[in-house]
Structure formats: C-alpha cells, structure tokens
Image (spheres, rainbow, N blue to C red):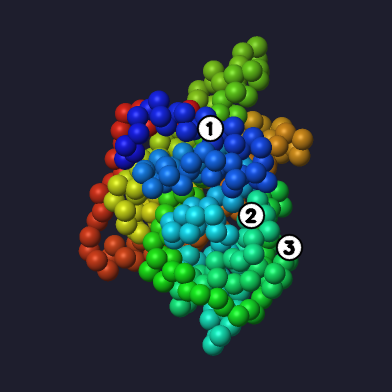
Amino acid sequence: MSTLDANELELIRTSVRHLLEGGPNGFSVGLAELGWADLYAADPSAAVGVLAEEVGRAAAAVPLLSTVLAQALGHPGAAIVLPPLARGDGSGVPGVRAGDDVAISGLVELGLGQPATYLVATDGGVVAVDAAGLLTHPSASGDPTLGLTAVSGLLPHGPVVADATQWATAVTVGRRALAAALTGLAERMLHDATEYVLVRQQFGRPIGSFQTVKHRLADVHVAITAARAGTTTAWADGTELSAMAALCLAAKALRVASTHCHQVHGGIAFTTEHGFHTLIRRGQSWLGLLGHPDDLTRVIGERLVASRWVPRTPQLTRGAHHG
C-alpha cells in the first residue's frame, strides 16, 4: 500500500505521462530528473506501480524492466540484459558462466542508449560485461515496434555486482512492474473501446447501449480491478509467489480485454489503419518476459499442493480505479 496520498500520486502520474510523450530516447534521463530513484527509495510500490501502469497505458516502447531491475539490484541507471523470450517459469538467466567467460543470449530494450557495460544475470550471480563485445540480432518478438534487440556473445565477465538471491528478488519486483504494465495496457483497451461504442451507431442508437456490449466491457472492468488488486496484494505480501499470481491475474485481464474490446470494435479492429492490433501485439510480447503466465500458473499450483497452504486472496479496496 502506498504511503502517498491521492494528490501526490496523481502529480507523479501526470509527470510520467508527459515524460512518455517524448519517446524512448530521453526516458532514462528524464526519469532521473523527475527524481524517480528517490521515490523508489521512499515508496517502491508507488514508484514502480505508477511508472509501469502509465507505460502500459501508453503502450510505450521504453526500457521499463531494465530500469526497474537495475534499481532493485541497487545499480540505478545500469543497462540490463533480459532473459530471452521463451516459455517457462522465468527461472532462466541470459548468461551462463564458463570459467572466466560468460555465454550470453538475451534481450535489451529500446532506449538504453549506448552503455559501456551491461549487467547480465548468470547461474553464479549478476556480472558486468563489455557492451561492445555483444552481437545484435533481430528479436523474436512479434511486435517490432517494441524495439527489443536480441544480443549474444561469449565474453570475459567483469566483477560480480549481485548474487543469485538478489537477482531473484529483483525479478520479483520486475514481475510486479510487468503486472502493472499489462493492467495499464488492458485499461487502455477498455478506454478506447468505451470511446468507440459511445459514438458508433446501429439502428439509430450508440452500440454502447446494447446489453451484450455492456456485459463485455463490464467483464473487462472486473478483470482489470482483480489484476490491480493482485498487484497491490503482491506489494503488501512481498513474496515471490504473490508476484507470480499478480502477473497471472494481469495476463488474464489483458486476454479478456483483447478479446472483448476487439469484439465490440467489430471489423474495423482487424484493419492495419485502426491500430487496435498494435495493442494486442504489445501485450503478447510483454507476456513472454520474466516467465510466461501459463507456466507460472502451473508453478503456483505445484507449490501450493506441495506446501498444503493457501495464500490470502487479493484485497479489493475502494477507489481502486486509476485514471
């Protein structure tokens, strides 16, 4: 639960929105000028939650996860190599140490500039490597506008800057951030669909007045509310399992929004010119980062069965909607 009041959160939200309007190139510098690192130190749930949700709402191609992971590792501003897009529980790392070298296969986000070094998680901790030695390749992401670049190489590793436990803790924070981003993206879909059904007319009246359309959009609203509650609970609990659950709830909200909002738009949403497809592609690419939700759901089930323990459900609170 954030320690900031509603007015303070809205001020931060407005500042982040203005920053995102400038695109990825000035993102890291602008975020530093906003004092985001200080906000993270004072209230990480507000810092990460507001930033990630606004990135999702804007469907912005900025280095969100690199920023959050670097801050969580205690190296603010560092450039992070993310694990490659893959099905799995997210336990994989982009680097494997082999003697004095590290074999790297991962992703870097758009907007990191030209860093001298990258931080790479390996099976033996997080190490620094020379950025100039990395080879770049086209990303396997289905969304080329996201700007993910695949990198690889066999490089000498520098100092170990964090151990495996610290990386696991950072990934947990990253999953909360990704959950917030997916929730923000789902809310963007709901907003656009609502605007559309209020003006699109059939039989002489807005299609938003039709019961079926209302029910579809209501289902999206419920899924988004559940996702946001899951992320709030994950910050309160501070556990790896609750972060996984939050990401799964957010993924469900995105899927419900993708289906129902696409449906109420009708045939126009299939067109390249309309642009709704770009939101779906952005969400699908984000779903492959830090563990696929379908696989995380299985992991959660296996752990609950093994422990014979049921966690508390996400707590719904008044005023859960963020505009």
Q: Residue 112 carries which label?
A: 2
Mark 2 packing: few (<14 Cα in 10 Å), some, or many (20+)? many
Please, is residue 285 above or below residue 10 in the view? below
Amino acid at pointer 2:
Leu
Q: Is mark 1 on a helix, strand or loop?
A: helix
Question: Could you say which quadrant of the image residue 47 lies in?
Answer: top left
Q: Earlier in the sequence, mark 2 or mark 3?
A: 2
Measured Cα–Cα span from mark 1 to mark 3 = 33 Å
Taking the spot 45% from the left edge, 28% from the top edge, the residue there is 10
Q: Which residue is drawn at 52% across and 38% down?
A: 34
Q: What residue type is labelled 3?
A: Pro
Q: Is mark 3 on a helix, strand or loop?
A: strand
* Left or right: 225, with 209 as reference point: left
Label 1 sits on residue: 15
Report which quarter residue 157 is drawn in. bottom right
Q: Give the distance between the C-alpha atoms of the residues marked 2 and 3, in whole angstroms.
A: 17 Å
The x, y position of residue 251, in whole percent, is 49, 49
Q: Is residue 139 left or right of residue 63?
A: right
Q: Can residue 189 be seen in this view?
A: no
Nearest the viewer among 180 and 314 is 180
Residue located at (48% from left, 41% from top): 35
The residue carrying mark 3 is 138
Query: Residue 134, percent across and down?
Result: 68, 71
Residue occupying the far right of the picture: 273
- For mark 1, does the 10 Å Cα neighbourhood hold few (<14), some (14 to 19), or many (20 or more) residues? some
Type of amino acid at the residue the image marks with label 1: Ser
Disc 1 versus disc 3: nearer the observer: 1
